[in-house]
Amino acid sequence: MAHAAVGTSGSFMERLNSEWHEVAMRTFMVIVLGHWMEHFLQTFQIYVLGWPVPQARGLLGLAFPWLISSELMHYGYALVMLLALWALRPGFVGKEERWWWTLALGIQFFHHIEHALLQIQALSGHNLFGRPVPTSIAQLWVPRVELHLFYNTIVFVPMLVGMYYHLFPPDTAAVPGRPQCSCAWHTRSVASPV
Amino acid sequence: MLPQGSGQVTPRESFTMTARNAIRLAMTTFTGIVLALSAIGIRWTSQHQPPAAAVASATVLAISSAFAIAALVVIWRKGASSQ
């Protein structure tokens, strides 16, 4: 795969955002989409199949119920999302793709704070607002299932648009010297036309 | 007499399955699922949650839907990519 941004030398971050960017992005998407499938399945179980909320645990949660109740697991995923959004951001060099990816990063930062609050409560054993279970700020108003669907959507949608512009950069011709990531479709279509 | 050119119709652009359109369709499928679940969710929460919680749920699900629609508009609009 041709990659003009940085060669095979450079720091880990430089290589992550050049020659490894495509593989890293694909790996990240497998994780994110796997997580999405769990949320899709959970909401389907509740809204369509009519399962009681505590029993609607997606797919993995049916086999491993602790997954759905583990604040550490939820916090870990939020942290992985935040770190990946931050670490892969320099590879988004175009104006539009960078803007949308940064929007996702900003929203995920707040989402991560919410999960950090839950994690602190789970670890300390003291719940905020006198609630019987760990409670985030938005959870004061919004039930947890809908809140998760909301956060995941408003983080993933800007990622989706950012990735679209990253795959099909609109200003490539306008900026001839711009580094071309191997994620961009035209860099591979020369060798293997679709 | 009709003004010159008034009867002319611009031919519609044909849809070809380019890589860009394939990616657009995949993204559209995903956002379609989000929109469908949000719509079903708004109905379900109005019937199964206390009024205040149902309003809050409907609000966040509506915002989620707005994000999904915005994404569709951006990726499908003309000139969203030069390729």
Image: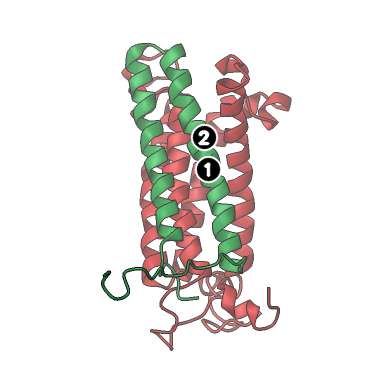
Residue A7 visible in the shown view = yes
Residue at image location 64% in from the left, 44% down from the top? A34
In the rendered image, the quadrant that contains the N terminus of chain A is bottom right
Give me the chain that's green: B
Which chain letter matches label 1?
B
Residue at image location 41% in from the left, 72% down from the top? A94
Q: Given the current orientation, which residue lies at the most extreme bottom position?
A: A177
Please rate how many residues cluster around mark 2, counting C-alpha atoms within 10 Å: few if below 14, some from 14 to 19, many from 20. Answer: few
What's the mark number on residue B32? 1
Percent position (x, y) of residue B44?
48, 19
Q: Is residue B53 above or below residue A119?
A: above
Assess whether mark 1 and mark 2 are in contact (beta carbons under 8 angstroms): yes
Please rate how many residues cluster around mark 1, counting C-alpha atoms within 10 Å: few if below 14, some from 14 to 19, many from 20. Answer: some
Percent position (x, y) of residue A140?
34, 22
For the residue marked with disc 1, what is the amino acid? Gly
Percent position (x, y) of residue A171?
41, 77
Q: Quadrant of residue A126?
A: top left
Question: Do the dots labelled 2 and 1 sit on one chain?
Answer: yes
Residue at image location 55% in from the left, 22% down from the top? A47
Q: How is the image coloured?
A: by chain
For the residue marked with disc 2, what is the amino acid? Ala
Percent position (x, y) of residue A38?
62, 35
Q: Look at the image and give the colour of chain A.
A: red
Which chain letter matches label 2?
B
Q: Quadrant of residue B54?
A: top left
